[in-house]
Amino acid sequence: MAAYDFFSRRTHMQKRAPCEKCGKMVAPYESVRLGSIEEGYQHLCMACTNAEIAEHAGVDFKHPEYLPMKLTDVEGIEHEFHFNTRLLGNRVAISALEIKNDEPHGYSFEVLTNNPEEDTLELFRRLFDRMQRALSQRHLNVDEYGLHITKPDIVRARIDYDLENPESGPLLVIDGKEVAWDEFGRMLMSFEGFQFKMEIYDISEER
Ligand SMILES: [Zn+2]
């Protein structure tokens, strides 16, 4: 098994296609291209992918299916999340992607464990708690002058990219909203003369 390509979170305009093993119709964000250049690739759902990986790694792994869920943020706005459980050899990751119009947009979370034979329910609880904490936070607010950073002066963001506008610099996702790099720069102008420090960390971490 030479490759494990999780489809890009922002594959644009890609349609659902059947899993080549079980026939289930799956969206790009809930499927994987599994295989190698020599043997070719298969488009598989997560359950079939995990079964292949479990066999290859000699791991006893039960693939859990978590149904999509709607959560409400601190402003009363509903967000729909889809879950993916991925067996990564000796680790397991569960991710939650916010889906709008059948494409990932907005919030994205992931938790990891180093024990693939452990009950994934505990891992799911950890993910769910993290989602709830994030949805109750606000780093930006909007007034007649536009978006600005709330107090205390901390911003947590995910670094994404704009497929339609790759020259425009990184696209930030803050409070589940897409914020252009230039827009973020404008927000910093109200802090002229101040300093800041920037930490970059994995999506599975929370800080
Ligand atoms: Zn399948």
Image (cartoon, helix red, strand yellow):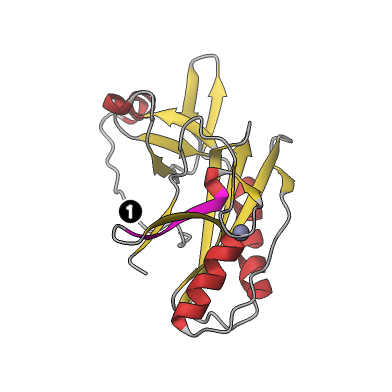
Residue lying farthest front?
Answer: 39
114 lies above or below 1: below
Left-right relation of 73 to 158: right
Residue beneath the point at 51% across and 34% down: 14
Query: Is residue 129 shown to the viewer in this render?
Result: yes
Q: Give the image quadrant in which the ligand numbered 1 is located.
A: bottom right
For the residue pair 159 and 192, the one nearer the viewer reads as 159
Instruction: Give the residue pinned by disc 1.
Output: 200
For the residue pair 86 and 35, the one nearer the viewer reads as 35
| Quadrant holding the N terminus | bottom left
Residue 72 rendering spot, x and y as whole percentages: 73, 42
Left-right relation of 7 to 83: left
How many circles with numbers are drawn on the protein? 1
Residue beneath the point at 57% across and 51% down: 30
Tell me which amino acid carries mark 1.
Ile
Q: Which residues are magenta?
A: 30-36
Which SS does the magenta portion mostly show?
strand
Query: Is residue 136 shown to the viewer in this render?
Result: no
- Determine if the magenta segment contains residue 109: no
For the residue pair 181 and 112, the one nearer the viewer reads as 112
